[in-house]
Image: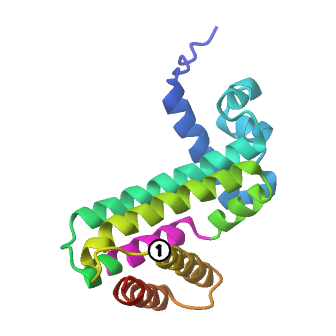
Amino acid sequence: MTNQPARQRLSRQERYVQLVDVAWQIVREEGTEALTLGRLAERAGITKPVVYDHFTSRSGLFAALYREYDLRSTARMDAQISQTEPVLEKLAAVIADAYIECVLLSGREMPTVIAALSGTPELEQLREEYATTFIEKCRALFSPLSKSKTVKTPALWAMLGAAEGLSWAVVMGKISAQEAKDQLVQVIICMVDKVSD
């Protein structure tokens, strides 16, 4: 009888982190079509019921990947903001840099995850949550720096739309990351300076 090392039992949170990491690996290496709960269980070396216990459905798994991306990008942005002087141009540059860099870090994977969620209630809820968080963060940052001490909601939505559109253009290779950042900075400054009047 051979002595095999005992398998380490992971906490629920540790298992969740492991499954999310393995899911990203599958998406990177094989594409979103290959990412099923069964495939994830196989690659993680665990049983299907454990995976189902964490995600319940394939769209639930993709929603978890979207949330993980959102948390990562928000943490990166918050860290940069906390070290930045409250000056319009500097904060606009931080928002632009953090937004574009987070998209670049996810490469082509994030758009494919969003595509896999397309048409699901999960995607609509996630996008709404993300948009609300981004808009309120920008409102809090830029309102004190605007002439009228407020940035109107349409201007904030314009910032988000510009950030999404420019990021997509970078991922598709239509413009460089630096071009996207520079343009996003200009959009933010314009929205804060002019639309808030």
> Which residue is nearer to you in this view: 111 or 84?
84
Outermost residue toward the left?
A: 85
Q: Residue at x 36, y 82 (%)?
A: 192
Q: How is the image coloured?
A: rainbow
Vertical position of residue 49 compared to residue 86: above or below = above
Does residue 154 appear left or right of residue 48 in this picture? left
Residue 163 position (above or below residue 79)? below
The magenta region covers 93-107
The percent position of residue 122, horizontal first and vertical second, equals 70, 48
Mark 1: which amino acid?
A: Leu
- Up/down of 64 relative to 103, above or below: above
Query: Residue 101, how many percent across, how many down?
Result: 45, 73
The residue sitting at 53% across, 25% down in the picture is 12
Q: Main secondary structure of the magenta part?
A: helix
Q: Which residue is mark 1?
A: 156
In the image, 76 versus 40, the foreground residue is: 76
